[in-house]
Image (cartoon, helix red, strand yellow):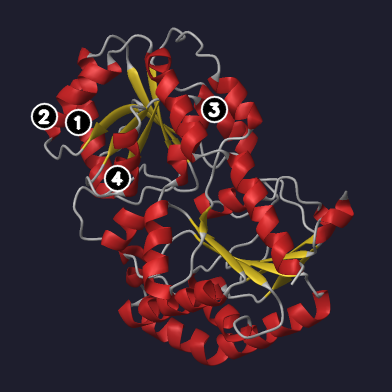
Amino acid sequence: MVSDFPRLLVATEAWPNSPGGGLAIIRQMLKDWPTEKLIWWSCFPDGKKIFGQNIASHRVANIPQKLYPNRRWREQKSWLLEHFWLPWATRHFKNTLADLKPDVVWVIPHCWAIPPLARILPGGTTPFHVSIHDYMDICGVIQKFGERRSRQMAGMADKLYASATTRDAICTAMVDDLRARTGANGSINRAGLDQADFDHLAFAPDRKEGPIRIAYAGTIIAEDTFALFARSLAQIRGRLPQPVTLDFFGDHSYRSRSWFDPGWMKEHGNLPARELSQALKECDWGVSPMKLTDDDRRYNRFSLPTKFVSYLAAGLPIITIGHPESTVMKMASQYAVGLSTTEAEPEALGKQLLEHLSEPEPRKKYRAEIMRCALGEFDARRMRAQLYDNFRKGSAG
């Protein structure tokens, strides 16, 4: 019954139908939440509803795109946001709480949404749940905003997490790290598989005739690693039993990169969740790279790319490449879901790719471990139930 659901305000930087792994998690978790009980606060307006997320009300503390810091003029733009936008955004969020009167707020601390939320929610009367998807002191954020501001945002996110009514994070390593630093315990919440996905995994369809299709979903973060993979694959593709294609699904284009070869690489753009799921099911492998070095420890050790879960849901064996201490490599070391490698030499990596991509029925070979990993680590039904329980606990006081 709708009455069983508290009035929920989602508060984060991004809009309801924004692309990206973090928003994919949010939308999946809100699948069963009634629209009339769902409201949103963000720093950007919603665009085309490509992902189908509907809400009852949306309040926007808008950051003009030209003012958003992104390496170029980052100090000047950040100064303007701090001195002019932030005081107004803080009042805007305070007024949103007063006007919309949510029973509970779901905070996903990300970039410029963090400062106004951290000024209002801790010590206030509105209960709130915090979900940490990424740390704000990873290299990518530091490059955008500078080290000082990134560290400040990271500290504010910790403050939100520590003072929240209930909380969660993306992986066990992050939950443990946050507990050690803030003294607050949390559960795990991340992208997962729903019943239809598990039903799909129960069967391993025979491989269709045609090229070996390798999928890459989302934005390329560890581009050095991905370039190594692409060049190694280029060296051995002529020796594979079938031609190979590399299929990109996401918001960014990589056609200008030196490693991109339009002869066997294809860009499909950003697809709605259902279309992306179907497109991935038509592929044979997924690739999930992270940095081979450990120079971005906060990302390597505490972030878990949503693409890894998307491949599992499609039943794809996964080519995992990265530093041995990275989250995806540790996950791949527990479950034999495909090729897991730390190899940094193109020839040696090419040899491993040749062996694995020559497997005639990869889905069947790895199906049992894909299912075991999905059930043990990525059951969306279980995580959604835990999250909804936290929302109800908060709203009940």
CB-based contact (under 8 Å), mark 1 and mark 2: yes
Q: Position of residue 62 (x, y in %)?
A: 64, 75
What is the spatial separation of the Cα atoms under label 1 and label 2, in whole angstroms?
A: 7 Å
Q: Position of residue 17 (x, y in %)?
A: 65, 53
How many numbered discs sit on the rendered protein? 4
What is the spatial separation of the Cα atoms under label 4 and label 3, in whole angstroms?
A: 24 Å
What amino acid does circle 1 point to? Ser
Relative to 369, 100 lies left or right: right
- The residue closer to the viewer here, 53 or 126, is 126
Question: Which residue matches tag 2?
Answer: 347
Quadrant location, the C terminus: bottom right
User: Residue, x 77% and y 57% (percent of image)?
Assistant: 55
Question: Which residue matches tag 1?
Answer: 232
Q: Nearer the viewer, mark 2 or mark 4?
A: 2
Circle 1 residues within 10 Å: few <14, some 14–19, many ≥20: many
Circle 3 residues within 10 Å: few <14, some 14–19, many ≥20: some
What amino acid does circle 3 point to? Ala
User: Residue, x 17% and y 30% (percent of image)?
Assistant: 349
What is the spatial separation of the Cα atoms under label 1 and label 3, in whole angstroms?
A: 25 Å
What is the spatial separation of the Cα atoms under label 2 and label 3, in whole angstroms?
A: 30 Å
**Earlier along the polypeptide chain: callout 2 or callout 4?**
4
Q: Nearer the viewer, mark 4 or mark 1?
A: 1
The residue tagged with tag 3: helix, strand or loop? helix
What amino acid does circle 4 point to? Arg
**Earlier along the polypeptide chain: callout 1 or callout 3?**
1
Residue 243 is marked as none
What is the spatial separation of the Cα atoms under label 4 and label 1, in whole angstroms?
A: 15 Å
**Earlier along the polypeptide chain: callout 2 or callout 3?**
3
Residue 112 in view in this figure: no
Question: Which residue matches tag 4?
Answer: 257
Question: Which residue matches tag 3?
Answer: 279
